[in-house]
Image (cartoon, rainbow, N blue to C red):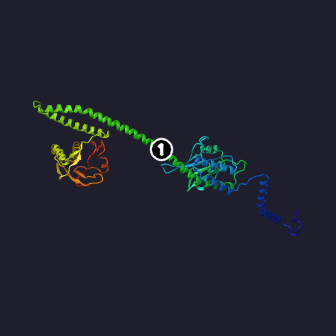
Amino acid sequence: TVFEALPSFNPLIVGAGIALLLSFIFTPLLSLIRTLVNKWFSMEEIHATKTLHAYSQQISNILDMQKLANVAVGLIIEAMDITRGFLFLVDTEHGSDGTKTYNIRAVRNPGERQIKILPLAEENPVVKHFLQDQRPLLQYDLDLLPGYRSVSSADRDWFERLEAEVYLPIFSKREWIGLLALGAKISGNRYTEDDLVTLATLANQTAVALENARLVENLIQLNTELRQAYRDLDKANRDLERLDQTKSDFISIASHELRTPLTTMIGYTEMLIEDQTLPEAAHEMLKGISKGTKRLHEIVESMFDIAQIDARALHLHLTPVDTALIVKDVAHRLEKTIKERSQSLSIEIPPLPKVKGDPNLLEKLFQHLLNNAIKFTPDNGRIKVTAKAAAPTGELPEGGVEFIVSDTGVGVAPETRDIIFSKFYQPGDRLVSEGGHALRVVRRAEGSD
């Protein structure tokens, strides 16, 4: 109407000019009107920069997971004027077939209603959206967009029970570690694009604090598990000590009770062997019985020594001992066994100083060593005993003697050398009982290292 009086009036051109003018003044005019309305009605406008700064300051030093959830969600609810909010942790679980499952678990206070964990496979559209786009997801999109139709009804029910309108993924080092679920605005308005940008930035600000809190949570859980493991280990050690004590008591009682009847059996057997009126076949059987009984008596004596060692009741009778003489005496008693196996035994012992030791225990020690050498050396094999004076060392400040028993047998496997002196150690199908060692001795196959 105003421009109709112009001589070259064109409604189309005039209308376009008026529309262009309005487009330039609309945004500033709208901002001015909004400011005036807020001022008149005492309404506060959300300033994103101010909100982000305050949010970052208040959550940066929180290491407790529940406190972080309460503060972070509370600040967002207050700043964005929304009804509710939840913080979830995302735990990645790797399957044996290489697939991943993302378990979403809520951070809730002990008194609050707990939310069950939601497992989502990596093929789930919701997971794909978060991992690929790393953008907020609206409940509206989840309900209506065709790309989310494959979401199962159980998963949809889980999201619907939250009564949330927007879901914000939290990433740290490109790993999905958390999720913020926020409800509707109190005003009833929809989330604008600016709101989503602000919320996405808040989620990014949460990532560092959430990662730190998760590390602390994992450390607390690890410490709890370690304390429980220590308690279990301590209990197991006490049980083992009781079991070992029971075993030692049994060995002590059994060996003590067996000594008397074995002594009687040995005595009567020797008396029968000396009776020349018995047939030759009976004598042979009696000799076998005598040999077996004496061997059983040696085993019982070893068991008794072990029981005394375990009970710290073994008393050593230390005297100056000629170890070379003990070795030769033991070798002399084993001559018959060595001949039966067609083996050769050479003893190369130079003059040695006497050592302070218990002659009975040293005799048992050399008896075991030579018996083992005979047992594990094939027929026609060779056994050699050598010795030398040992110079003073940290373990032997006054010096000593070193004996080496070598043979052409199977030797000792490298992986078992540290345990061959353990009680009741069983190499293969043979049981070796070592009551302890008062002398360091090296046993090896000839020609080996």
Q: How many marks?
A: 1
- Element class at badge 1: helix
Image quadrant holding the C terminus, namely bottom left
User: In this picture, is 390 found above or below 286?
Assistant: below
User: In this picture, is 64 found above or below 255?
Assistant: below
User: In this picture, is 78 found above or below 243?
Assistant: below
Front one among 345 and 12: 345
Q: Is residue 138 left or right of residue 378?
A: right
Q: Residue furthest bottom?
A: 7
Q: Is residue 436 left or right of residue 333?
A: right
- According to the picture, the residue beneath numbered tag 1 turns out to be 227
Residue at image location 51% in from the left, 49% down from the top: 219
Q: Is residue 69 left or right of residue 356?
A: right
Residue at image location 78% in from the left, 64% down from the top: 20
Front one among 321 and 156: 321
Give the image location of residue 320, x and y in percent: 21, 46
Give the image location of residue 203, x and y in percent: 62, 53
Q: Residue furthest top?
A: 277
Q: Residue furthest right?
A: 5
Image quadrant holding the N terminus, namely bottom right
Give the image location of residue 310, x and y in percent: 32, 40
Would residue 252 be visible to someone looking at this image? Answer: yes
Residue 14 appears in which quarter of the rendering? bottom right
Give the image location of residue 234, x and y in percent: 42, 41
Which amino acid does the dot numbered 1 rest on?
Arg
Q: Please tell me how crowded label 1 is: few (under 14), some (14-19), or many (20+) other residues with Cα within 10 Å.
A: few
Would residue 130 be visible to someone looking at this image? Answer: no
Residue at image location 37% in from the left, 37% down from the top: 242
